[in-house]
Amino acid sequence: MRSFTYERAASPADAARAVAATQGAKFIAGGTNLLDLMKLEIERPTHLVDVQDLGLDAIEETEEGGLRIGTLVSNTALSAHPKVRRDYAVLTRAIQAGASGQLRNKATTGGNMLQRTRCSYFYDTNMPCNKRKPGDGCAAIRGSSRQLGVIGTSDSCIATYPGDMAVAMRVLDAVVETVKPDGTARSIPSAEFHRLWGDTPHVETVLEPGEIITHVRLPAPLGGRHFYSKVRDRRSYAFALVSVAAVIQSDGTGQVAFGGVAPRPWRLPEADAQLRNGAAAVVRTAFADARPTEDNKFKIPLAERTLAGILAEAKG
Amino acid sequence: MEFNAPAGENLFDRSKVVGKSTRRIDGPLKVSGRAPYAAERHDVAANQAYGWIVGAGIAKGRIRSMNLDEARKAPGVIAIVAATEHNAVGSSDWNIAPLFGGRDIAHYHQAIAVVVAETFEQARAAAGLIRTSYDSADGRFDLETAKEKSKVGTGFSGDKSESTLGDFDSAYGSAAATVDATYTTPDESHAMMEPMASIAAWEGDRLTVWTSNQMIAWGKKALASILKIDEDKVRVDSPYIGGGFGGKLFVRADAVMAALGAKAAGRPVKVVMQRPLMFNNATHRHATIQRVRLGADQDGRITAIAHECWSGNLDGESGEDGTLQTPKLYTGANRLTRSFVAELDLPEGNAMRAPGEAVGHLALEVAMDELAEKLGMDPVELRVLNDAKDTVPADPDTKISDRNLVRCLREGAERFGWSKRNPQAGGNRRGRWLTGMGCAAGYRAGPTEKSAARVRMDADGGFTVETDMTDIGTGSYTIIAQTAAETMGVPLERVNVELGDSAFPASSGSGGQWGAASSTAGVYAACVNLRRAIGEKLGFDADAATFEDGKANLNGESWEIADAGALSADGEMTYGDFKDGYDVGTYAGHFAEVKVDAFTGETHITRMLSVCDAGRILNPLSARSQVIGAMVMSAGATLMEDLHVDKRFGFFANHDLAGYEVPVHADIPHQECVFLDTLDPIISPMKAKGVGELGICGPGAAVANAIYNATGIRVRDYPLTLDKYLDRLPAIA
Ligand SMILES: Cc1cc2nc3c(=O)[nH]c(=O)nc-3n(C[C@H](O)[C@H](O)[C@H](O)COP(=O)(O)OP(=O)(O)OC[C@H]3O[C@@H](n4cnc5c(N)ncnc54)[C@H](O)[C@@H]3O)c2cc1C
Ligand code: SF4
């Protein structure tokens, strides 16, 4: 870990300005992802701006009947909130399928959206990795890629966004609210928040330098039945091989997003439209452009079978 | 004391302490955080500095240059010992690649420098500033390819790993039912909770290393030889060990780099091997390819049995011998076992819990399941029918000391409800779940090693046992205290146990499941000598007397043993040749029940049972912990543990605990372990055998067989992850 300077910001705009003002500065929230990466020198921020004093730790009801979640709301608090459990159960289930109790106590909403990939080569600084070092090459493409992405990847990077919470956020059409260093606020639909890697896999979201997440907004509840199925090699404390978040209405229509397969929670409206035609039709549509490796091509049939399990339960 | 004839009836047959479930005497220290593990020994040497190991960034080749300038100037840095400025260290009998090898790189993450600084963070930060460039050389990283050039390896005894009996080929050729199946097991990591850790301090030319090591006497010898100093000048101390599983049988780079760092810094240095280095710097269990061929007559009697195994290592000699149990488990007149080793340039393979057998059972015991199905026989019955009786099947000149495998299987079947198993594989579906049961037999040798101890009695009749035996979480402290309390006839509370210091008499150490049987026998020997010293002092024949409640009794007379005053005796148990005519083994019947998700292929173990035959169980409570822990590890090997070999770069890519998955609590909902009340008079006066490795010999095969019973899908490529059989699961609507 390199030495760094540290400050605590008093307002979102101050925080944004502070990060924009210093080359190599970063925000720190729960620190559960950033500090691990700093110890391994994968992240080497020169300056940290701590956002914990910003008071953004409330869950408020919105006029449109949804919820507005402060970025500092912990994963534990968010998943346990009575309204979330009742109206957005897919979110509760997704959060609780992730990490461990201790980590969820510390992890924040914004930090979770921004957690970085778990590609083994990203974690080993002896290995070439375009995401760590643009232009370095990608060790994973012909290497150990069982965990990695099958769609939305590129010739530069085949890593995934590894998290769970954001997959549910995507199915719920959550909106990320931010403040930029100049003080202006904007709302980013979760569909647009994470970028596909293209040839700049080190740029992972549409956030601009210094732009801070203040809230994540959930639209009015969708109703229906909520599912989150996370498939992995052990029953807890592992990232998804494939996860499926779905909200299914009694008429069989609904929304579905896939985790563990792409640079972002993977959802296509045209795939949602296939829900009444069954899992195979959905997956055929959602993964039409898939480019899996030999190691991870199982993820596509696995996605189909996992969704089929959900649809069977939704019917039963 | 030499154990040179089978044990007759002795005091342990009337025991009050030994054999009783006893809570760990070191438990309160451990659960309250007061048992100091190697890295926490802040008090043993003043002014400790911190060392950080730098691992090689290539798998094979040579270091061209190391730029140390920036690191040397970094805050807090005291010294850097770097491969470009230092010759390779010496070798030892316990490792292949040098633990610090100069410019030559033998494997990925081999230590190439240690940075010593005032704080841990400063050492780590400075290490990040070192720039190393390499000339890479080509290496051999693929077992499947390297296998072509493999040769028969050597076993622990130094003998060639092969044996034949009768005429396998013709018996197999004419068998009524045959199985010919090839299984693969991956490289595995010990992944113990406490990584390697050492604090080293020099006083002139004398070196003390406070470390985490299973085998103190080996460690002392190895350090002397690696550092080229006199063995008498080395002290190794390791009273608490946070798990080893064979990974700490040997001195590794933490101790060596701490010693070199301390010399360079001129003060004590602590080195904890960082977790991401543990997988490639330290040792691992070798991957195997195993071919098993079984031939049987119509009734299920095995007539031909062959087991061949291929693994690889740096020296092309010492591999993972998956065939070890095969000469012992089942009868059959025509046999062949052979273990080949190829040269590979991956990190060094070495012992991991039940080396050989742990993965050998994953092949042999699944092949037995396959044979049972071909014969239309119940898998328990097939094993019972082919049970060996009095002599070792592959070596009829060797007698079996005591064997109750059939009881293990029968009792296990009864307790587990085996009769409810549907023999039709894939035949049980409830909702989305396919359920099934599987069984396996288990064999692991029950070795003994000579072991010494010292027992001191204080003036007030308190006792202290001193031996360099180690407690790797197994419960050695407690069984040693039980043995001394029993032999001296005093309550357990009167016995204090000090372990792990090379200044104490040399014990068997902990490994190969010999520790419990051997170290307690050594303590018994020392206690017998102390009893004699007491008898001499007080004027009675100690060998004829009984010791009870702090008194010695003989012919109606009684002596307070504390009246003898402070006394001390050393003793060592050694073993006579008579044992050579016997095979001393431990046996188990393992059972598992699973449910497999018909949609996703996820396997959930629902129940596990192991019934164990391991002689006298010294402490049922801690023995149970050993077995259930091993069952977890065995389940992990079957379901998930897998070091991913990157065959281009030559290393294990998933080198942290996020990438290398071991079971979590949720994976193991219900376990049961039963010990048969057996005694083995051939092993030692205690008639007790180890269990720590028996528990990893077979449960994983029972899980694999249960998955087959549930799904009707046989996967022979471990771990049995869902991607390997997704396409064979029932079709979805
Ligand atoms: C062992 C382990 C297992 C895990 N398992 C899972 C799992 O199964 N599923 C899962 O989903 N996750 C898992 N995680 C990841 C965990 O969810 C994340 O580490 C956590 O959510 C990150 O939140 P944080 O507040 O600690 O973020 P930090 O580490 O503080 O920050 C993460 C990133 O977000 C940026 N950031 C933080 N807040 C803001 C803000 N308000 N505006 C702009 N940028 C910001 C930081 O600069 C940093 O780049 C696991 C983590 C660990 C360590
Ligand atoms: S897949 Fe992406 S993160 Fe992994 S090595 Fe390649 S570039 Fe790096």
Image (cartoon, coloured by chain):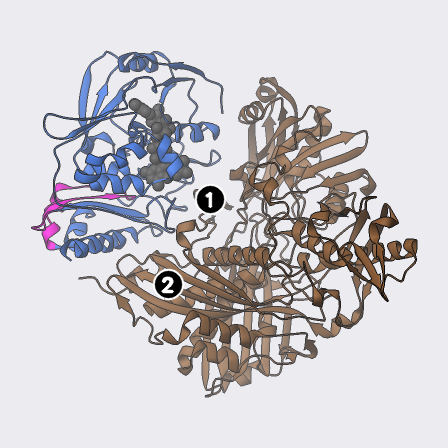
Chain colours: A blue, B brown
Residue at the outermost front position: B556
Compared across the picture, whether B577 is left or right of B322 comes to: right
- Chain letter of disc 1? B
Query: Would residue B236 appear left or right of B703 to someone viewing this image?
Result: right
- The residue singled out by tag 1 in the image is B653
Nearer to us of marks 2 and 1 is 2
Identify the residue at image location x=37%, y=73%: B421
Q: Which residues are magenta?
A: A249-277
Residue B440 in view, yes or no = yes
Q: Is residue A133 above or below residue A161?
A: above
Q: Image quadrant for the C terminus of chain B?
A: bottom left
Residue at (39% x, 27% y) in the render: A31
Task: Say what secondary structure mark 1 lies in.
Answer: loop
Q: What separation in Å lies between label 2 and label 1 (alpha carbons)?
A: 30 Å
The question of residue B131 being in magenta is answered with no
Task: Say which chain tag 2 marks.
Answer: B
Number of numbered labels in the structure image: 2
- Which residue lies under the disc numbered 2? B594
Viewer-nearest residue: A189 or B527: B527
Residues packed near mark 1 inside 10 Å, few (<14), some (14 to 19) or many (20 plus): many
Residue A264 is a magenta residue: yes
Whether B497 is drawn above or below B399: the answer is: above
The quarter of the picture where the N terminus of chain B appears is: bottom right
On the image, the x and y values in percent for residue A15 come to: 31, 15
Q: Quadrant of residue A118?
A: top left
Instruction: State which tag comes first along the sequence, 2 or 1.
Output: 2
Q: Position of residue B430 (x, y in %)?
A: 26, 65
Secondary structure beneath dot 2 equals: strand
